[in-house]
Amino acid sequence: MSKKFSMGQLKTDLSASWAIAKKDMRIYYIKPGTLMFGVLFPLFMFLSFAVGKNAPAATLIPGLISITILFSSSSIGPMVIPTERRVKTFERLVSAPISFYSIILGKTLGGFLFSLAISVIPLFIGLLWFETQIISLIALIAGLSLASYCFATLGIMFASFPTENPGDIMMLLNFVRLPLIFISGLYIPIESLPEWGQIAAAFSPLTYANDLVRYALEGKTLYGPALDSIVLLFFTAIFLLIGMSIQRKFSEGVSLGKKRRKQ
Amino acid sequence: MENAIEAINLTKYYDDLLAVNHINFEVEQGEIFGFLGPNGAGKTTTIRMLTSLTKPSDGTAKIFGYDIQSQAIAAKRRMGIVPEISNIYDDLSAWDNLMFTGELYQVSKAEREKRARELLEMFGLYDRRNSKAKGFSKGMKRRLTLSMGLINTPQLLFLDEPTSGLDVQSALIIKDVVRELNQKGVTIFLTTHDIEEANVTCDRVAIIHKGKIAAIDTPEKLKKTIQSVQSVEVAFDKTTPKTLKELEKIPSANEVRKEGDKFRVYTHDPANVLSGLWEYAKANGLKPISLTTLGPSLEDVFVRLTEIEVKTKKEEF
């Protein structure tokens, strides 16, 4: 009965997701860990590699936006979910009469909106001081939105591992985020990478996010905005599926899915 | 009338550990049902399964006829949950905690504001409604957790150790509210370590031990099952460290326990113990200050049921 699709339940789930996102925004956006990993970390990472390069500043803005989106959107889930597990408020969500999807949607919305808000800062810096131009507004909106949502789901996927310490997840996540920066064409154009680098770049969602933002602001693209968007959607779906399956597995304890030995 | 809870062969394994062993019981609408058991007996796992937080390995349960697995959302809509740990948002005010919970349970804005005001007043928190919960005492946090469990006006309330470790004021407020809710028809499923609380609060209790229901009935009927465990409680004007050992020698005394300044002599023959105590007092120049004959308490039932297996096990070795 309840497994059947119902418009009423969908409306309920969406409104619960929005309530969860609003609550996360109020509680976690100004936490030191969020500001450190979501705002300061990408900025300093960018400056440490961009300062001293001879490239015009305007060409660095798409990279700064991409790296900001990567870090800001993927930091919220790993901050929020382990903390909520520790203080047992995550169980409050799971015990509410809403679907598990709505909890995940609410949690990703938190990262998505945080990232959108943060990523407009480097965009305005570029527009106001470095003669950055918006070549395609649609591609820009698509780039910011799809990349923010994709990396928010990346954060949720990592946050699904059963730990109560946000630091554990951040450490694990950085093992993935930091290499992505170097293989995704942010500092070195993908065309200039060795063959193995170009193959690796094709498996990085940051490649497509950066390519889409570069197209929106410089008109240059390697894969084309349509393919970039599709691949970002594909990665989003993969991260969500893996995240939800990990989440379900561990919310049931170590025993889920194993054949029981009857007495 | 549909049962509020119906556990059918409910079972939970954690790998090879059988935490809850094919249990069956019903809770009628409007009952206060106590779920007692020692630590690790399976109480929390059972509550987690009944509230859809943990998936049963076998069997199922129904909440007002809704299956907790296939109709989990409909079942959850009818329940309020107050876990053992006060899981509130410390960074939100008491008011915002209630508003958020109301949103999760799809309570309309007007209704949740009205309910929040009523609940905060009922639990003595209205004056602190705009304070962040992080500054609240343990008792205040517990009262706020209970308010959050009631924001959706549930028909069934799960209370896990509601008064454990609380100050007297908070414990009294919570007990009063539970009684009041029950009078309004809310079914209460209560776990507690406080056997006396269960004795005076619950219509029926179940005692779970090692994952199995050891007994289930009204407190009075359970006490009748162990009429052999009666006792005489005595306090003397003076005692020595030897008193306990000497009282154990009284004919018909099965066991003697020191409880504060009193001694409790368990027996199947209180009359014989009374005369033995009289002779002991006379022989030792003691004056009894108080003397009470007691029937078995719910705690005696609990101890008897949860110790029997331990003793049996020991005998097996």
Image: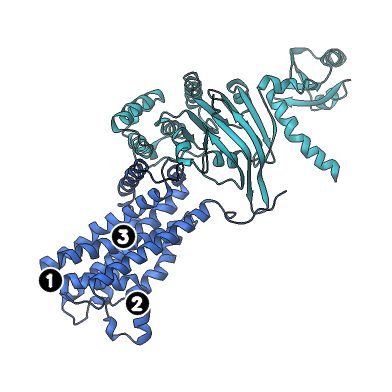
Chain colours: A blue, B cyan
Q: Position of residue A174 (x, y in %)?
A: 39, 68
Pointers 1 and 2 within a single chain: yes
Q: Earlier in the sequence, mark 1 or mark 2?
A: 1
**Does dot 1 land on a helix, a strand or a loop?**
loop
Which residue is label 2 attached to?
A202
Chain name for mark 1: A
Q: How many badges with numbers are in the image?
A: 3
In this rendering, is residue B96 above or below B291? below
Q: CA distance from mark 3 to mark 2?
A: 19 Å
Pointers 3 and 1 within a single chain: yes
Quick check: can you spot residue B214? yes
Write the residue at 60% across / 36% down. Answer: B7
Q: CA distance from mark 3 to mark 1?
A: 27 Å
Q: Earlier in the sequence, mark 3 or mark 1?
A: 1
Q: Which label number is shown at residue A185?
A: none
Please identify, in this view, whether the residue under mark 1 or under mark 2 is nearer the observer: 2
Write the residue at 36% across / 37% down. Answer: B97
Which residue is label 1 attached to?
A130
Which residue is label 3 attached to?
A149
Q: Quadrant of residue A42?
A: bottom left
Q: Position of residue A10 (x, y in %)?
A: 35, 45
In this rendering, is residue B230 above or below A162? above
Three-letter code, disc 2: Ala
Would you call the spot at circle 2 few (<14 residues within 10 Å), some (14-19), or many (20 or more)?
some
